[in-house]
Image: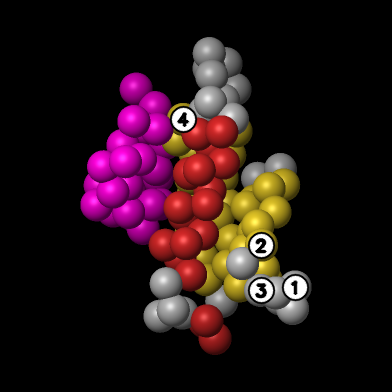
Amino acid sequence: MDYQWQTDVFTAFSPAHEALGKITYQDMPATPHPTYLITQVWVDPAHRGQGIAGQLTTAFLAEVRQRTGYVIPQCPYAKAFIAKHPEFQDLIAK
């Protein structure tokens, strides 16, 4: 899978460049470090049940870590994913 970070959206693409899913987020201004409010994790209905949401969320969080950022998981999926994966819990904005 390939990923593309754009303003307010992080998208997963198949090798054939088909959009498989996306994370929508908002930059939170006036924070000392880059902070992203995760508003939705979405996977195309034709590709659900294949673990794409988890791969997409993992890639997004890895990118946030690389940017020395933090997240506010508003989306229920993102919130549950981070709760189940302690390796990402340090990315939650305090």
Point 46% across, 30% down: residue: 70
> Regarding mark 1 in the picture, which secondary structure is present there?
loop
**Left or right of 72 on screen, residue 35:** right
User: How far apart, in angstroms, are the residues tagged by discs 1 and 2?
Assistant: 8 Å
User: How far apart, in angstroms, are the residues tagged by discs 1 and 4?
Assistant: 28 Å
The image shows residue 33 at horizontal and vertical percentages of 54, 19
- The amino acid type found where label 2 is placed reads Asp
Kindly identify which residue carries mark 2.
2
Q: Is residue 93 magenta?
A: yes
User: How far apart, in angstroms, are the residues tagged by discs 3 and 2?
Assistant: 7 Å
Bounds of the magenta segment: 72-94
Kindly identify which residue carries mark 3.
14
Residue 49 versus residue 34 in the image, above or below: below
User: How far apart, in angstroms, are the residues tagged by discs 1 and 3?
Assistant: 5 Å
Residue 30 versus residue 89 in the image, above or below: above
> Regarding mark 3 in the picture, which secondary structure is present there?
loop
The image shows residue 18 at horizontal and vertical percentages of 71, 76
Q: Are marks 1 and 2 in contact (CB under 8 Å)?
A: yes
Whether residue 92 appears in this view of the structure is yes
**Is the residue marked by circle 2 packed among few (<14), some (14-19), or many (20+) residues within 10 Å?**
some
Kindly identify which residue carries mark 4.
70
Q: Earlier in the sequence, mark 4 or mark 2?
A: 2
In this view, the residue in front, 55 or 45, is: 55
